[in-house]
Image (cartoon, coloured by chain):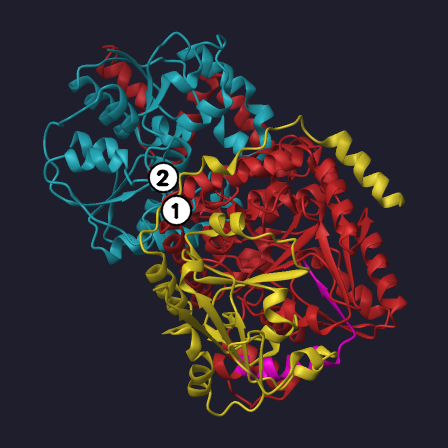
Amino acid sequence: MVNHAKNAEAFNQDEARTNWHDETLWFVREKRDKASGQIPEWEALRELASGIKDHTLSKLDVYLEEFEKKATENGIKVHWAVDAQAHNEKVFEILSDHGVKRIVKSKSMLTEECHLNPYLEEKGIEVVDTDLGERIVQLAEDTPSHIVLPAIHLKKEEVGEVFHNRIGTDKGASDPYYLTEAARQHLRQQFLTADAAITGVNFAIAETGGIVICTNEGNADMGVHTQNVHIACMGIEKIIPRAEHLGVFLRLLARSATGQHLTVYTSHLHKPKEGSELHVILVDNGRTEQLGRPDFRNSLKCIRCGACMNTCPIYRRSGGHSYGSTIPGPIGAILSPGYDLEKYSSLPFASTLCGSCSDVCPVKIDIHTQLYKWRQVAGAEGHIAGSKKRAMRFMGMVFGSPHFYRKVGRLMRRAARFMPNKWIYNRRNVWGKSREIPPMPKESFRDWYMKNRLGNGK
Amino acid sequence: MESRSTILAAVRANKPGEVALPSIRTIERNEISNCTDTFKNLVQAIGGKVEEIQYNEVQETVERLFPDAKYTASGTKRYKGTIQLEHITDPKALENLDVFVCRGLLGVAENGAVWLPESAIVHRVAPFITQHMVVVLNESTILEDMHAAYDEIDVAEYGFGFFMAGPSKTADIEQSLVHGAHGPRSLTVLLLKTL
Amino acid sequence: MRVALFVPCYIDQLYPHVAVATLELLESLGCTVAFPLDQTCCGQPMANAGFEHVSAKAMSVFIDNFDLYDYIVAPSGSCVLHVHEHIKAPDSSRPFSDRVFEFCQFLMDVLEVKELPGSFNQKVGLHESCHGLRGLRLGVSSELRKTPYSKPAHLLSMKKGVELVPLTRWDECCGFGGTFAVSEEAVSVKMGKDRIQDHLDHEVEVLTSTDMSCLMHLDGLIKKERIPLKVMHIAEVLNG
């Protein structure tokens, strides 16, 4: 059971660090604002992207089959996996066929979701994450806290310490240029000595049977083009109908993610290079189930830009790890309950429903509305604490009866006025820990109105 | 094949009623008045360099820009490198490549990207493993935006093709921007002016 | 114009002066205001906590009190949004989303107010409540790439003497969020502190908002820390 509030409270123990985390991500949000502001047709693009995704989801089976057919014609080997286990087994099978001992892997949230790394390591295959952020968390024996910026929770001094211990950089060195250069040298050796490459997929084009991978570092391409075996792992929702749709999504993706106009590398793979193999694994792992939930299906439109995390005032002040799920932040809080409602039932409550996530989302997922709806599912299915449930039932009764409501209001105001402060600010008054309770006036507005407008003052 | 039929059956059972596909032609695109200038500004803004040269000045320009380069390779006839890419079979053999020069098929004004298909780069790994990258681009090929770019190119024509927007970069350590993460440390676009 | 005043429960009980200011300003703008006496609460506190199903009675109390009116006005964006999205009017051709208005929205869109009586000589910081801004679209949020405007800000600029102070993160959430304020106390308090600091950094004297719930949270923090910042509902500022 993930307790977001508890994790968030722990995160907030170090206020200076919370401020640093908040400001770092707000900086990314501001870059997004600037980049998107340069596109006058931004809102129309969002609408279009949303419409294309809605359409795709409504014909997902057709496009998956079209993709499979075209990709196969192109010489790509297409595989299907119902769940994480099937996916991992398929990956292992391919790697075993080629006697692979070490793989270089670029960023793929799907493989994180399937816990591929520990699975392969148990089977004796070394996995080297090659995205700098992912390599940092891998060497630190940590997990990513953000889908685009995996090591955003770590300070450069901490990265320096990890690199010193694991790849032998100078003790105390924390200059990002120096550390990045060290990682470049270290990972070049990995690229040159690995046996296979694994990547994620940003878009798969049904019409042409090709896949598109976006990176800034060039790590996916370094892996793919140096190895003779490439396995690309993708959730089935990554399909888009036509190549021309890339224009729409690519204009939105990088601007939303990091405020760049386009990622440095946008690679289109349609055929394996000569003498090599390209495998694509299409993974369900709960996606078709989500597709069957009318209130929640459009979460599958997500293009994994991370903008909802950067904008979320709660994410910025609680950190990605507080969500305890592969995908954190607002989008994670609507995806994760679909996998395991009991485990992730606190996530839909890690929000004020401010709606910033929905407004920033490049494919217009109504994230905050879905958070509200997951709360209702959690409430109805008994995943909310008994004390809260009783309180809400009581409030339901109070507000259901005008007479009772007035009586309780009067009693509450009177009691608070006469109660000594130390009784009011007791341990169980969570509101009062850092906040004064509101004033308790003698009369309600209704009392005032009766007296002053209805001449009913006694 | 069990997974395949299970997934497709689940999609068919769970998908919503068909939603019409909107046309991308409905977008009223922002007009860019001077594509060349916009492109140049953007390439520089994202960490690249632009040099305007004549078509017969590629060789001397690259030599001037990279006087210390030991191993160079080329995908264009306008530049002769020290390594003949056609003779390379193992991509890892290119690990010491200092400069790679190739032709860009088109440029995109809105983001400073160039389109590099497999035919232009000869060896897929070359533009990634090289320390420095030089792209020769005809000014006349610069288009307004990504929609125009995808109208122009056939992504499936080659086994591989990519947009490159600036040199390889990362900001994974405290959002500090560093060029040269895994790919080239620099990108120079040699722009051949249209007369 | 005949208007029904919908007073959110916490304003009725804790901030009656806010409802008085709302009533007085509506009256001075020529409205005939009725206050249905048996109103309680729209049900939002329970619904946002995951218990929409226990708020059914509260919703029917709302319908009993307000269904006969064509214009219903409340000094709260949050409660109005909840009514719009979750309370179904008995006659579907007269949905509440067409009839229930947040106070500023009513002044701007229905009364089309061009000037306001009186003056208010203070440096004012506007806290854009999320439900008003992104829910009711009382303005354009900072995420959207549309021509900026804000109905509450527009009304404040109409008021003589008001110096509306620009803020750095002008539409970031204050962290109230109903039960969130208690269930996620640490983040809620941190968000509130950060909002207050933004106002202090810009030398705001009066912090105002369309929603007293946000202000209750912020004022609680302000009072606890004895910060010299006054909190007033926008109806009080506009009526002042």
* Helix, strand or loop: magenta stretch: helix
Q: Which mark is residue C174?
A: 1
Magenta stretch bounds = A179-200
Callout 1, which amino acid? Cys
Residue A374 included in the magenta stretch of the image: no
Instruction: Name the one closer to the observer, C169 or C75.
Output: C169
Specify few, some or many for label 1: CA neighbours under 10 Å numbering under 14, 14-19, or 20 or more: many
Report if the CB atoms under discs 2 and 1 are less than 8 Å apart: yes
Residue of label 2: C129
- Give the drawing colour for chain A: red
Q: Secondary structure at mark 1?
A: loop
* Residue B61, placed above or below residue A204: below
Q: Which chain is yellow?
A: B
Q: Position of residue A450 (x, y in %)?
A: 28, 14
Q: Specify the subunit that label 2 lies on.
A: C
The reply to the same-chain question for discs 2 and 1 is: yes
